[in-house]
Each structure stands twice: as structure tokens, then as C-alpha cells.
Amino acid sequence: MTKSIEQNAGPLAGKVAIVTGAAQGLGATFAIELAKAGARLVVGDLADPTATCAAIKSAGSEALGVSLDVTDPVSVANMVSDACARFGGVDILINNAAISGQLRLQPLISISSAEWDRVLGVNLRGPFECIKAVAPVMKQRGYGKIINLASGTAIKGSPGIAHYVASKGGVIALTRAAARELGGDGIRVNALAPGLTMSEAMLVNPSWTAEIVANNIASRALKREAVPEDLVGTMLFLASPASDFLTGQTLSVDGGSVMN
């Protein structure tokens, strides 16, 4: 009981957070850490979110798992409606769902139009759909935190994944536009831009060879692999009242590969 009380009294006590793409990987890490900080969670994913919800409950918080297709406005609207029905509103949205770890490196001229549309649909239109659905709820409260997952690739212009780079560049631009539009309603919109992070999907992707990972590490001031836990501190800062006077920004968390 003491453990649960301590967690519920955290910096996000009483807050309700949606994390998309949270059945596994980085999204699951984010959801569990938000729970430890006191938030109640809505876990949305095409995959089964049961394991993440169980971990959240073990951390002393509440969780609602929903089937979510971020490219389907009806699916997104239903998720937000379910969140409001269960928890009374939404304070935090983390747009994490993306096609990333399963992508293979290939020249721009080899990317099919269908694959381009699929990546842009999930990675860019997905955050748009989720922001569009959650903004009216946050406006009613006069407060909200939206955190979009961008990528250092959009800043560096990394080769081999042009569709992914373009989608994350769009996320940065969407973050700025949404911050301008929603700031008057007390809604802060920021982006978190990781470097190459060794999530579950990356570890099993043959495109990300030891040589490629080593070259990426060599570009960093802090020369080691990045793991999902390295992003938690910045995510919690952006979700918490500590960043209430910060909006429209993209924070690079990559060990100093990108410096801006």
C-alpha cells in the first residue's frame, strides 16, 4: 500500500495520459514510467496492450488498453472517448506510434509509393489525427501536454530511410504549427527527437548492423548505445508542470550526435 501511495503522489498525480504504440518497446517504457510518476494511462496500439497494462497496474496505477489504428480517425476518436469515459478527460498525449524499427535501409529511388504512403500515414498523419481528437478535450480543461516523437534523422538528413526522415521532419513542423494554434488554450506541444535507440525492434532488424550502430555511436559526444530508458527523463520533463513555459520545441536526446 505504501508503494502505491508514493507513486500516486508523484509529479503527475491525478493526470491522465494517452500513449500510442505502447504495447511494447519505447511506448511501453514511457507508459510504465508515467504510471510510476502518478498518471493514469490509456495504452493504445494495434498489438495487444495487455502486458503493458499489467505492468502499469503493478506500478500502482490504473490502465485502460484500447485497440488503436492511428490512421483511422474513428479509431482515434473512440480511444479519446473511452479515455474520457473511464478517467474523465486527458491531460497528456504522447504520439509514439510509428513505423520505424521494422524499416530496412534502401535508396530513395527503391522506396515504393505504397511504402512511402504507409510510413507517412502512420508517422505523420497519425499524430495529426490524435492531436485533432484530443485538443477539444484539453481545451475544456485549459491545459494539456502533447509530446510528439520526432527523430534526429530529420535534423541530420540520414540516408537510407528517406520516407522515415520525411515523416519525422513533418512531425517537427506539425509540432511548431500546433504549438502556435493551441498555446492560447493552455496546450503545450513539443517534440522529443531520439537518436538511434536500441529498442526491441531495432535489435532484431538486420539492416542495423554492428557497423552502422558503431558509426552512429562514433558521432556522439557520449559514446555508447542509446536505450529506451535514456529518453524517460526528457519525456517526464515535457509531460510535467516543470516544462509549462516550453512549447513548440524539439529536444534532441541522442548523446550529443545532434547539437542545436
Image (cartoon, helix red, strand yellow):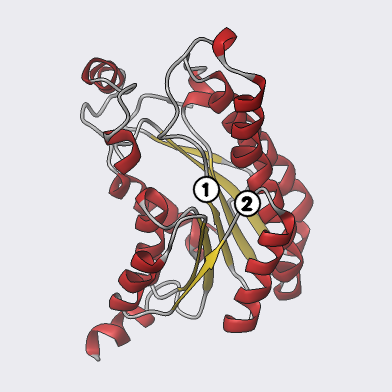
Q: Which mark is residue 48?
A: none
Residue plotted at (34% across, 21% down): 207
Relative to 217, 101 lies left or right: right
Residue 238 rendering spot, x and y as whole percentages = 49, 55
**Which residue carries the number 1 mark?**
97
Relative to 51, does residue 203 appear above or below in the rendering? above
The local crowd at label 1, few if under 14, some if 14 to 19, many if 20 or more residues have their Cα within 10 Å, is many
- Which residue type carries mark 1? Ala
- Residue depicted at x 42% and y 23%: 104
- Please rate how many residues cluster around mark 2, counting C-alpha atoms within 10 Å: few if below 14, some from 14 to 19, many from 20: many
Q: Is residue 9 visible?
A: no
Q: Earlier in the sequence, mark 1 or mark 2?
A: 2
Image coordinates for residue 111, horizontal then vertical, percent: 57, 16
- Identify whether 94 is placed above or below 241: above
Which of the pair 215/67 is nearer the observer?
A: 67
Residue type of the residue flagged with mark 2: Val
Number of numbered tags placed on the structure image? 2
- Secondary structure under tag 1 reads loop
Disc sitting over residue 70 in the figure? 2
- Above or below: residue 141 compared with residue 68: below
Residue at image point 52% right, 55% down: 46
Q: Are marks 1 and 2 in contact (CB under 8 Å)?
A: yes
